[in-house]
Image (cartoon, rainbow, N blue to C red):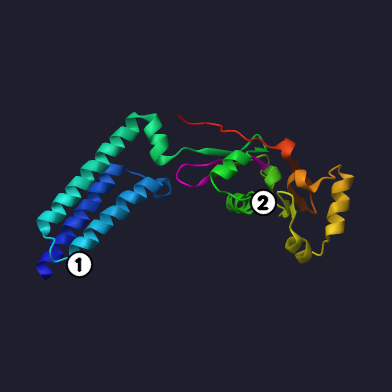
C-alpha cells in the first residue's frame, strides 16, 4: 500500500511539472482563473487516487495523461482563436479612461466604489480624481496610470451612488448638513443624480454625476 501511494505521488509530481510546461513560464500574477482550474482538477485527480484503493497506478496514469492532453488542446485553441480566448480567459476591462469612470465595466466585474478605491490605494493612488486610466486585467490585477505622481493626500468617500456615507462623516467630525450645503454651493441639488463624491482638506470636493461617467464596453486588446 505504501509503495502504491509513493508511486502515485511521484506520478502526481511529474504531472504537475508537465502542466507547468504546458502553461508556459508565467509569473504567479499572470495565472488566469482558467489556469487555476487546471491545477485544482489535477490535484483532485491525485487526491482521489491516493485515498481510493480501487484506483491503481494505471488509472492514475490514464487520468493524468488525458487531462494533460485536454489542457494542451485547450491552450492551443486559445492561442489560435481570439474569441475563444476571450470566452475562456476573459479580457482586460477599462474601468477609468481619461479620468472618466465606466459604470458598465464596474457592474460587469461586480466592483463597488469602495472596492475600486481599495484597488487604487494598493497602487499608491489615494484619490479617484487622480486616476487617469485604470484597467482591470484578465488575471485580476489592476493597472493604474495617475494624472500626477504627487498623490500625498487621502480622500474620503462621502457619497456613493446617491447615498450619503454617514459613518465616514461622523468619523471625521462632519455632518450631513455641511455636506448638503457644500453640494448646493457647487450646484448639485439632486442627490440621486450624484454617482460619487470624495473630499479631502487639500483638494476639497471631487464630484461625479450621471453626466460625468460612461456606460459602454471599451476594448484595448484583441
Residue 109: x, y in percent?
53, 45
- Viewer-side residue, 146 vs 74: 74
Residue 133: x, y in percent?
61, 38
Query: Within 10 angstroms of label 2, few (less than 14), some, or many (20 or more) residues?
Result: many
Query: Within 10 angstroms of label 1, few (less than 14), some, or many (20 or more) residues?
Result: few
Residue drawn at x 10%, y 55% as measured from the top left: 58
Give the residue at mark 2.
126
Q: Is residue 113 left or right of residue 15?
A: right
Residue 65: x, y in percent?
17, 47
Give the extent of the magenta segment: 131-142
Q: Is residue 58 left or right of residue 111?
A: left
Q: CA distance from mark 1 to mark 2?
A: 50 Å
Q: Is residue 14 left or right of residue 26?
A: left
- Viewer-side residue, 39 vs 143: 39
**Labelled disc at residue 51:** 1
Residue drawn at x 11%, y 58% as measured from the top left: 57
Q: Please, what secondary structure does the residue beneath circle 1 have?
A: helix
Instruction: Give the answer, above or below, for where 27 lies relative to 73.
Output: below
Residue drawn at x 52%, y 31% as measured from the top left: 220
Amino acid at each position: 500500500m505504501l509503495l502504491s501511494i509513493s508511486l502515485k505521488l511521484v506520478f502526481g509530481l511529474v504531472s504537475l511539472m508537465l502542466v507547468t510546461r504546458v502553461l508556459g513560464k508565467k509569473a504567479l500574477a499572470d495565472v488566469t482563473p482558467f489556469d487555476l482550474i487546471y491545477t485544482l482538477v489535477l490535484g483532485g485527480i491525485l487526491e482521489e487516487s491516493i485515498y481510493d484503493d480501487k484506483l491503481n497506478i494505471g488509472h492514475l496514469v490514464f487520468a493524468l495523461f488525458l487531462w494533460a492532453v485536454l489542457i494542451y488542446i485547450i491552450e492551443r485553441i486559445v492561442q489560435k482563436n481570439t474569441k475563444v480566448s476571450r470566452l475562456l480567459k476573459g479580457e482586460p476591462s477599462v474601468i477609468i479612461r481619461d479620468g472618466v469612470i465606466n459604470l458598465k465595466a464596474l457592474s460587469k466585474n461586480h466592483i463597488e466604489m469602495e472596492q475600486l478605491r481599495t484597488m487604487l490605494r494598493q497602487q499608491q493612488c489615494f484619490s479617484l480624481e487622480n486616476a487617469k486610466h485604470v484597467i482591470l486585467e484578465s488575471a485580476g490585477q489592476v493597472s493604474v496610470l495617475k494624472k500626477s505622481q504627487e498623490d500625498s493626500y487621502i480622500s474620503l468617500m462621502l457619497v456613493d451612488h446617491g447615498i450619503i456615507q454617514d459613518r465616514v462623516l461622523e468619523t471625521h467630525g462632519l455632518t450631513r448638513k455641511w455636506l448638503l450645503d457644500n453640494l448646493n454651493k457647487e450646484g448639485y441639488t439632486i442627490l440621486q443624480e450624484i454617482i460619487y463624491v470624495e473630499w479631502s482638506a487639500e483638494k476639497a470636493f471631487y464630484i461625479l454625476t450621471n453626466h460625468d461617467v460612461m456606460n459602454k464596453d471599451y476594448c484595448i486588446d484583441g
